[in-house]
Image: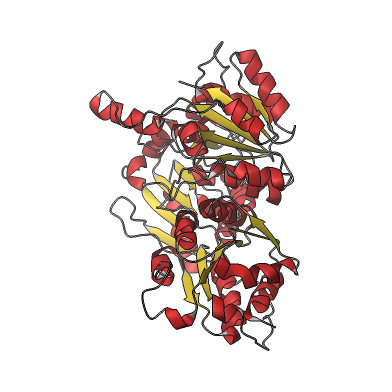
Amino acid sequence: MRASDLLVACLEREGVDHVFGLPGEETEDVLFSMRDSDVTFVPVRHEQGAAFMADVHGRLTGDAGVCLSTLGPGATNLLTGIADAHLDKSPLVAITAQGGLERLHKESHQAIDVIGLFEPITKWNTQLNDPDIVHESVRKAFKLAELEKPGATHLELPEDVAAEETEVEPLPTRERVRVGAPDDETLERVQSLLAAAERPLVIAGNGAVRTDAAEQLRAFVSATDLPVASTYMGKGAVSDADEHSLMTLDSGAHGEAADAIDEADLVVTVGYDIAEHDPADWGHGDAAIVHVDSQPAEVYEAYNPEVEVVADIGETLAALTDWYEDTRPSFDTDWYADLRDHIVADVDREPSGEAPFTVRDVVPVLRELMAPADVLVSDVGSHKMAIAQNFPTYEPNTCIVSNGLASMGIAVPGGLAADLAVDGEVVVATGDGGFLMNAAEIETATRLDCAFTVVVFVDDDYGLISEKQESHRGESTGTALTNPDLVTFAESFGIEGYEPTTAGELRTALDDAIGGGMSLVAIRVE
């Protein structure tokens, strides 16, 4: 077979269903190899969208999403989505084409050092400069992308190598390498800290969701009555309906969850990722920190754990639960009850009578109309803060937020990937700034017969930046936008468009849209 046939056969062996990307001259052999395979190539409207689709697929499924581009500008357009997967710890395999080997030693058309360009944002990347190394390289790319902590890997296939013949076969897949169980000595140190604490608190991070440790975390919290505050990407690890949930850490050093951390005398972080949330923002006072994660903590003055349990997160939590049930140390279980009551009361609110609404008015309506297992994909902007704080999340991986790279433009392509990956309904929440960055992927979604709802919060502004400027200077500049008629824009793609102006219309429009096929709801906000 040709090297391109082998590459695609390896993708089939890895269980890949979709490859998201743009065609190019240098990907011709790969595209025709995919045409004759069980792998579906999804042509998208921009490579950034393809990378975001692969990114969100990886985050939702745990299996590496795959994106494809040609050389030069195709590869550079993938960068943002690959960097997002890198910082959000989402498994992704990027494949880029390259010119023939005979011209890479000199300056030539569209040829840049893609391997060097991708080096800082991938766990591993290499050029496939020999057809007989394709099988090993693809297996390694998937193994490392999915290995805890997951991330992005990259393969570059020169066009002349793609057409060469090879006799090697795809390597069989293997079970993923598991992180080991915690050692007894480290567990005993954690147990001593817990036994001496009166007001311990848990912070659930990205790793609690990513490693499927939610069940063990919930059992630990239920047994110990410890309160839990989640990072944006840890939402749903413990249900926000649970009496132990303090919902989500704010992005600054304020809010009830931050108040609870300030009162705690021991903080147990579970899968906490420093790239997602700066610990300097949640100031833990003199409380000791226990770090439970698959990798050691970053060295940082504001985050210097007393004990680090570098082990399988779920197994660590199960061991701590068993210890607690055997020893029953006494904790103060009432100290956070008032904070919890205040958080719950603050989240539940009715929208104002007519537009412009606030995002916080809209979020409770979305929550009411979405089932617990439905997925909300949030773009980045001022609305992301409101969603993180005020969208109660009941199951892991049902509120998808980019928070490591925090990249605008992820929502619409992310919604497409989510719609292909999950059985429940999918709702995309985006601002007018982030929406138009990748709005063209609505065409891709309609071509694939996707059915999700795009909610666009419209304020004709890069609102989060305006808010920050105004808090610093009392005014803003360089943030104003104009927008097309978004209902007409939606209808031009052949999907339903809504623009509610009263509270009643808002509820009706969202009720009709969610579960009713591909649609867009434009909501004027202040």
Q: Position of residue 505 (x, y in %)?
A: 65, 16
Nearest to the observer: residue 157 or residue 459: 157
* Residue farthest bottom in this picture: 167
* Residue farthest left in this picture: 473
Q: On the picture, is 131 further left or further right than 476? A: right
Nearest to the observer: residue 260 or residue 236: 236
- The quarter holding residue 319 reads bottom right
Q: On the picture, is 195 further left or further right than 376? A: left
Q: Is residue 404 visible?
A: yes
Residue at screen point 48% across, 72% down? 125
Q: Position of residue 501 (x, y in %)?
A: 58, 15
**Colour convention of the picture:** secondary structure
Q: On the picture, is 403 further left or further right than 366? A: left
- Pick the quarter of the image with the C terminus: top left
* Residue farthest front in this picture: 109
Nearest to the observer: residue 223 or residue 196: 223
Q: Position of residue 145 (x, y in %)?
A: 55, 67
Quick check: 26 above or below 504? below
Q: On the picture, is 227 further left or further right than 424? A: left
Q: Is residue 237 visible?
A: no
Quick check: 502 above or below 363? above
- The quarter holding residue 446 reads top right
- Pick the quarter of the image with the N terminus: bottom right
Q: How many marks?
A: 0
Q: Position of residue 70 (x, y in %)?
A: 53, 65
